[in-house]
Image: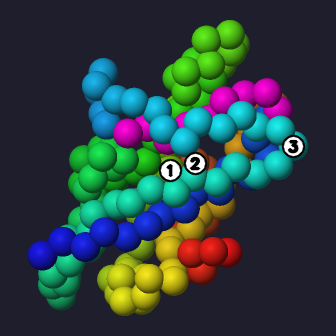
Amino acid sequence: MKQDVIVRIVLQKPPDGVDFALQKGSGHVYETVQVQQAHAHDIRFECSVTVKADRQKDEKPGFSGPFVQGAPPEKFIYIAIGTYAGQAESIWGRRLKVPLRGITWDTLEQVITSSELVLETQVPGSGKDGSPACATVKPFDGWKITNLNG
């Protein structure tokens, strides 16, 4: 049995004037959705991921769906940046990997049983030099349960 869960990614303080988007699909066959340009505020993305719903004693949750990338156990979601997000005139062409690690069955069961809850992570939108953050998010503080309308 499989169950869908909503995840929310908050990019904190991304650089102004740069487009960001979720990558839907993988390889060369993908599209960017929820394209947003940064303007002095955090950016939020929401998407659904599918969770393998049969919990077994030593098995970690498995994730799939059109927004999920990578091979187990290091699944992740891509945020496309600049030209990768369709912003042709951008000097940036990057992607940011947001890991789906650290999500426990206990956490998932709380979210699955409530239509009011989502999993949320907050990640830096800019690197130390002020350019858009890219590669795998580091440090990664993990996922927390929050209200859907929060």
In the rendered view, does 95 fall on the left or right side of 125? left
Q: Earlier in the sequence, mark 1 or mark 3?
A: 3
Q: CA distance from mark 1 to mark 3?
A: 21 Å
From the top left corner, tell me how far across and down residue 8 is, in percent: 55, 62
Which sits in the foreground, 7 or 60? 7
Q: Which mark is residue 40?
A: 3
Look at label 1 and name its amino acid.
Val
Q: Give neighbour class at mark 1: few <14, some 14-19, many 20+ (Cα, 10 Å).
A: many
Res 25 quadrant in image? top left
Q: Residue at x 44, y 37 (%)?
A: 23
Q: Give neighbour class at mark 3: few <14, some 14-19, many 20+ (Cα, 10 Å).
A: few
Residue position marked by numbered label 2 in the rendering? 137
Which sits in the foreground, 110 or 97? 110
In front of the other: label 1 or label 3? Answer: 3
In front of the other: label 3 or label 2? Answer: 3
SS type, badge 2: loop
The answer to whether residue 19 is above or below residue 67 is above
Q: Which mark is residue 18?
A: none
Q: Residue at x 51, y 81 (%)?
A: 117
Residue position marked by numbered label 1 in the rendering? 98
